[in-house]
Image (spheres, helix red, strand yellow):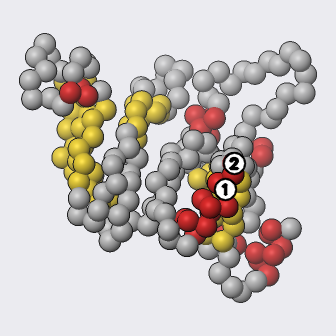
């Protein structure tokens, strides 16, 4: 239905979906915008309206990957005893080499953010000069996040760890994320991933 409607109209089209997880969106190439909310309860309508009409600046990152087709994901098992052989390659790990609509961790904002002062600190026996978030860590990644746009917003930076080929591990694994405070245009926040 949505594919037929979106391909036939000449007006700008935005789709609003409320889902418990990932869905396929065969209409995505025919719309100007897509917004998904994950089971927002009583506040679903308010959440949609606030984002669509600019009352709120979205900052969330997707906790799932939105695949292009149902065939790209592990099919549900109708049996009581299911033999899944994917191992660690489920969820976004199993879709790394696929063309997807929105990858795990994707999220847009009404503003832009710049990442500067990226630093990898190997922590020794002394934690002098390191942020408290890094104390006791073996390695700490730090960055400064600056709102480089014209609208106040919140950013959620993510840190991924990659493994060498041949270890049977996914190509990248989420190892940390942080949430900045609300940043006015030009304002910055320092974040650390211990």
Classify 10 Å Cα crowding around label 1: few (below 14), some (14-19), many (20 and above): some
Tag 2's secondary structure?
Answer: helix
Front-most of residues 83 and 165: 83
* Residue 155 position (above or below residue 32): above
Front-most of residues 127 and 4: 127
Report if the CB atoms under discs 2 and 1 are less than 8 Å apart.
yes
**Mark 2 sits on what residue?**
41
Location of the N terminus by quadrant is bottom right
Residue for point 70% across, 72% down: 30
Residue for point 38% across, 65% down: 111
Residue 112, visible in the rendered structure: no
* Residue 123 position (above or below residue 114): above
* Residue 40 percent across, percent down from the top left: 65, 49
Residue 102, visible in the rendered structure: yes
* Residue 129 percent across, percent down from the top left: 9, 29
Residue for point 10% across, 16% down: 126
Front-most of residues 99 and 66: 66
Compared across the picture, whether 150 is left or right of 144 comes to: right
**Mark 1 sits on what residue?**
44
Compared across the picture, whether 141 is left or right of 88 comes to: left
Q: Residue furthest right?
A: 79
* Residue 164 percent across, percent down from the top left: 42, 26
Tag 1's secondary structure?
Answer: helix
Q: Residue furthest bottom?
A: 10
* Residue 172 position (above or below residue 54): above
Snapshot quadrant of residue 53? bottom right
Compared across the picture, whether 26 is left or right of 119 comes to: right
Alpha carbon of mark 2 to alpha carbon of mark 1: how far? Answer: 6 Å
């Amino acid at each position: 239905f949505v594919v037929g409607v979106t391909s036939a109209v000449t007006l700008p089209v935005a789709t609003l979906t409320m889902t418990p997880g990932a869905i396929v969106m065969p209409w995505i190439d025919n719309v100007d915008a897509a917004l998904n909310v994950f089971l927002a309860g009583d506040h679903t309508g308010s959440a949609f309206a606030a984002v669509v009409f600019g009352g709120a600046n979205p900052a969330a990152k997707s906790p799932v990957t939105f695949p292009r087709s149902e065939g790209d994901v592990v099919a549900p098992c109708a049996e009581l005893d299911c033999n899944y052989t994917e191992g660690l390659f489920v969820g976004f790990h199993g879709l790394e080499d696929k063309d997807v609509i929105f990858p795990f961790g994707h999220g847009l904002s009404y503003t832009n953010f710049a990442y500067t002062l990226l630093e990898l600190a190997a922590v020794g026996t002394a934690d002098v000069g390191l942020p408290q978030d890094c104390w006791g860590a073996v390695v700490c990644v730090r960055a400064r996040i600056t709102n480089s746009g014209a609208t106040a917003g919140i950013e959620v930076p993510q840190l991924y760890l990659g493994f060498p080929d041949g270890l049977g591990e996914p190509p990248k694994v989420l190892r940390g994320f942080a949430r900045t405070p609300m940043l006015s245009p030009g304002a910055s926040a320092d974040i650390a991933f211990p």
